[in-house]
Amino acid sequence: MTKRIVAYRRIKPHHLEALRRDFHVDHFPELDSADDPAFREAMARAHGLIGAGLGVTPELLDAAPRLEAIATISVGYDNFPVEELTRRGILLCNTPDVLTETTADTGFLLIMAAARRAVELAELVKRGDWLHGIGPEHFGSDVHGKTLGMIGFGRIGAAIARRGALGFGMKILYSNASPKPALEAELGAERRELDALLAEADFVCVTVPLTAETVHLIGAHEFARMKPSAIFVNIARGKVVDESALIAALEKGQILAAGLDVFEQEPLSPESPLPHMTNVVALPHIGSATHETRDAMAQRAVDNLTLALKGERPISLVNEAAWTRRRR
């Protein structure tokens, strides 16, 4: 029997063709909701699911009794009920590694753009308001030689820190991570408790995953402990930060500026003050959004799902316990 895969959202033809060599594929390129009747009908017969941006619920899993594996085209998997998937023996695969360097580029882009007021001053030129030499009212902040505090020090956090330490001579602090002796030796990084890091860092960059423990990890208490000259950068998940507290900190001058690629609500509401604040650089969640990286992520997801449905261990497996259970 040929196993069946449901693919959703934007998956390129060559990736679909690779899957179709071994499986029957139902593709839903414009899927708006998991309640779509045709999608539900396909899921009732599906052994595999691949795509990005769909919230998977236990109720959807009930409607997919044959499901063996899910391959998300992302690193984050906060929209999947991991424990429930494991209980049902369904493998969940993601795409770490292939987007590390690109996402780190975005993080350091936000550090640079916020520090040097790049977007604000580019808009000044666009408006035709560059009528005389730039004075102190438009000066930015240096990046080189400053202290970079990483909240989270996994693959992406380490890649950002590497850019700062080796490229810009920055002192590296980190918190909310287990000790990293290899990175301490490579980069001179020093581990701090969160409050101590916030008080010392000139740039605070968040790269932790979104979990129950990290929701609103950064709020009014944390912003109050940062320097008034500090710049805050978030490329993790929007819900890691209490957005109302961030807005208040920016408005009150508790911190100098922010660079943001993620938000509590995405797309960002037009009513949010954040994109209208001159001391904020706001991007539309583009961390891994390059042609090369998105293609590599999709290929990793295809490889993961193909291996899983052939009874082999996927390259990037989130719930190891489901695999262990399957092998018993």
Image (cartoon, rainbow, N blue to C red):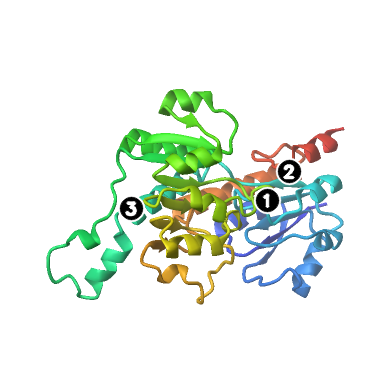
Q: Nearer the viewer, residue 84 or 2?
A: 84
Q: Nearer the viewer, residue 99 or 255?
A: 255
> Is label 1 in contact with label 2 (beta carbons under 8 Å)?
yes
At x 64%, y 38%, the residue is: 315
At x 23%, y 62%, the residue is: 137
- Of the residues shown, which amino acid type is indicated by label 3? Ala
Residue behind mark 3: 115
Task: Decide if residue 42 is on the left or right side of residue 227.
Answer: right
Residue behind mark 2: 308
Residue 68, image x and y in percent? 80, 49
Please report whichever mark, 2 or 3, sits nearer to the chain's N-terminal start. Answer: 3
Which element is circle 3 on?
helix
Q: Residues within 10 Å of mark 3 (few under 14, many from 20)?
A: many
Residue behind mark 1: 71
Position of 89 relative to 169 (above/below): below
- Of the residues shown, which amino acid type is indicated by label 1? Ala
Which element is circle 2 on?
helix
Quarter where residue 277 is shown: bottom left
At x 45%, y 52%, the residue is: 233
Q: Residues within 10 Å of mark 2 (few under 14, many from 20)?
A: many
- Per the model, the C-alpha gap separating discs 1 and 3 is 37 Å
Residue 251, image x and y in percent? 43, 65
- Of the residues shown, which amino acid type is indicated by label 2? Ala
- Per the model, the C-alpha gap separating discs 1 and 2 is 9 Å
Position of 58 relative to 90 (above/below): below
